[in-house]
Image (cartoon, rainbow, N blue to C red):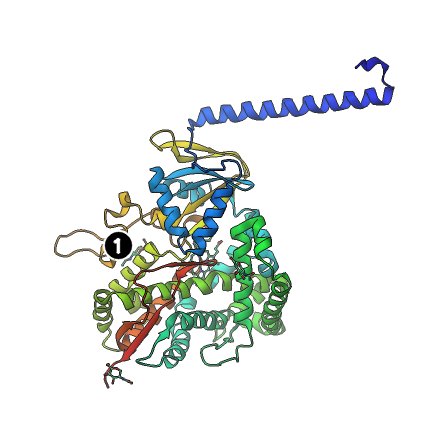
Amino acid sequence: MDVSKLPATAKAGLGLAAFYLLYLLVASITLWSKRRAFKREKGVMAVPWYQAADPIFGIDVVRGNIKNLKEHKLLERSHERFDIMGVNTFQINVLDRHIHVTREPENLKVIQAVDFKKWTLGRRRKIDFAPLLGSGIFTTDGAEWQHSREMLRPNFVRSQVGDLATFENHIGHLIQAIQPNTTVDLSVLFFRLTIDSATEFLFGESTNSLTNSNGEGGFAEAFTSSQDYIANSTRWGVLGKILNTEQKQFEKNNKFCHDFVDYFVDKGLARRTELLSNPKPDRYVFIDELVRQTTDRKRIRDESLNILLAGRDTTASLLTNVWFILSKRPDIWTALQTDVARLKGAKPTFEQLKDLKYLKALLNESLRLHPVVPLNSREATEDTTLPVGGGPSGRAPIFIKAGEIVSWNVYSLHRRKDFYGPDAEEFRPERWLDDPETGKKGLRPGWEYLPFNGGARICLGQQFALTEASYATVRLCQTFAGIESRDPEEHWQEFLTLTGVNLNGAKVALTPREG
Ligand code: HEM
Ligand SMILES: *[C@@H]1O[C@H](CO)[C@@H](O)[C@H](O)[C@H]1NC(C)=O
Ligand SMILES: *[C@@H]1O[C@H](CO)[C@@H](O)[C@H](O)[C@H]1NC(C)=O
Ligand SMILES: *[C@@H]1O[C@H](CO)[C@@H](O)[C@H](O)[C@H]1NC(C)=O
């Protein structure tokens, strides 16, 4: 083609296009050489690839994950993947994402604490949760998150979360709902317990789903269903749109939850002047504390729903997993009853609860082998490195490009034999206790034990959850002398929604104490 024969506008256009191409070329060479220098300086090395049949889009990986989820073996098989590959960090392409998967405590410490500011929750968490949760502590990053955290943290001090009288009220309802000597699924009751106590903590009024057969007005159901929908979206990304056929119902449920909470927010806002003139109320209500700080109605609603989502299923799942084990392991049941007998039948105080060592070891062990938040991830905001996972030994630093995802597997981390010993897969609460005979100290893990995450975004409700789970467990032990499993399945099986819980719940028969 003879360019000189083209009209002037076309010539200018071509010139511009050529210039733009040149610009792109220069920009990408500059970025490439900048990255190369960065990688050299940090001494990063290559990370093993997972050998997928489809290395570009990982279609086989996605199909495998769907199958594993259906067979309730997603966690088990992703744990095996590390062992089969013989590594603790690998990379994988899944649809449109390039992901590094790790179970290295050193990497998790850098993401969650040391380089905390270089990592965000990622687009997905924000977009998928927004229709229900708006923006609150669980769905924001940066300054917005920091503001939430500062506003909410004072509500989790000991005097608030140690309110055992309120727990006692709801646990009393739970115990009354149990027919002795007949099969009950405690899991159903635990999910009602945690929503009843969380709504009381947040709004000052409980859903009372344990006592009213339908009287809680459908909030629990709407909230659970919305959460299900979100779980589908976060797990399957673009495919979630196909799995989620109930868009209209989702919107209806979200509206229901919003109206439910707004009712309490409006009541709180109407009391604002009164609240401001009385800094020491005789009764603590979470929403009232937010009303003291802001008049933003949506903000208060969003934060309350964020807490409810973070705190409800997690604690109910922990209780379910613990009571499934208690029904299957007479040795653990007996040891726990011996520990609880030290209270001589009295309801425990907050201090006594902390002193029940075997109970704590049992909860620790449950959260180790059956972590209720088993998978998590973050997105890098800039080019960065993680300290391990590269090179033949897997001990060299690795490079993570801006915008890429690192996901971690707590389930697999908690089963590493190099940290927990050859019996890592066994449920053995004793590993957490000092052994008076051998003088062997109990486990005191650092970043290799992460049921509540660590660093700046460590779970705000850890104390609340452990207090509630401990108190419920003690009161049940004090009420019932014997337990029998009514579940033919011997082993814990995963059921993953936003949390991980035993598939069959906790089907048991409880025998009352004599007299
Ligand atoms: C056994 C029970 C629980 C477990 C295992 C658990 C675990 C976790 C984990 C792993 C995170 C980190 C999530 C992330 O950043 O990706 C988290 C965050 C959080 N949890 Fe919990 N949680 C439990 C109970 C609760 C309870 C009862 C509450 C409140 C009443 C609560 C409130 C929160 C909040 C507000 C956050 C967000 C903190 C932030 O991003 O700054 N959690 N939890
Ligand atoms: C429940 O079963 C236990 C042991 O089998 C028995 O001693 C007790 O009387 C039964 N209690 C009720 C309320 O049926
Ligand atoms: C989530 O996906 C599952 C299929 O994996 C489907 O059975 C369920 O109905 C979906 N939940 C919602 C709320 O759309
Ligand atoms: C349970 O685990 C936590 C966190 O590692 C630890 O601080 C605590 O001492 C453990 N308690 C018992 C009794 O094992």
Judging depth in this view, the residue of 340 and 252 nearest the camera is: 252
Is residue 417 shown to the viewer in this render?
A: yes
Judging depth in this view, the residue of 281 and 137 nearest the camera is: 137
From the viewer's perspective, is 133 left or right of 41? right
Judging depth in this view, the residue of 331 and 489 nearest the camera is: 489
Where's ligand 2: which quadrant? bottom left
From the viewer's perspective, is 283 left or right of 2? left
Q: Which residue is drawn at 42% across and 48% down?
A: 455
In the image, farthest residue toward the left: 437
Depicted 263 relative to depicted 293: above or below: below
Mark 1: few, some, or many residues within 10 Å (few <14, many ≥20)?
few
From the viewer's perspective, is 232 left or right of 346? right
Is residue 104 shown to the viewer in this render?
A: no
Depicted 57 relative to depicted 133: above or below: above
Task: Give the percent coordinates (x, y) of residue 387.
Answer: 40, 35
- The image quadrant that residue 134 belongs to is bottom right
Q: Which residue is the site of mark 1?
A: 426
Depicted 410 relative to depicted 275: above or below: above
| Secondary structure category for the residue under label 1 | loop
From the viewer's perspective, is 269 left or right of 97? right
Task: Give the percent coordinates (x, y) of residue 206.
Answer: 50, 75
Which quadrant: the C terminus? bottom left
Q: What residue type is labelled 1?
A: Glu
Task: Give the percent coordinates (x, y) of residue 186.
Answer: 37, 72
Task: Give the percent coordinates (x, y) of residue 466.
Answer: 36, 63
- The image quadrant that residue 192 belongs to is bottom left
Q: Residue at x 56, y 49 (%)?
A: 237
Which quadrant: the N terminus? top right
In the image, farthest residue toward the bottom: 515
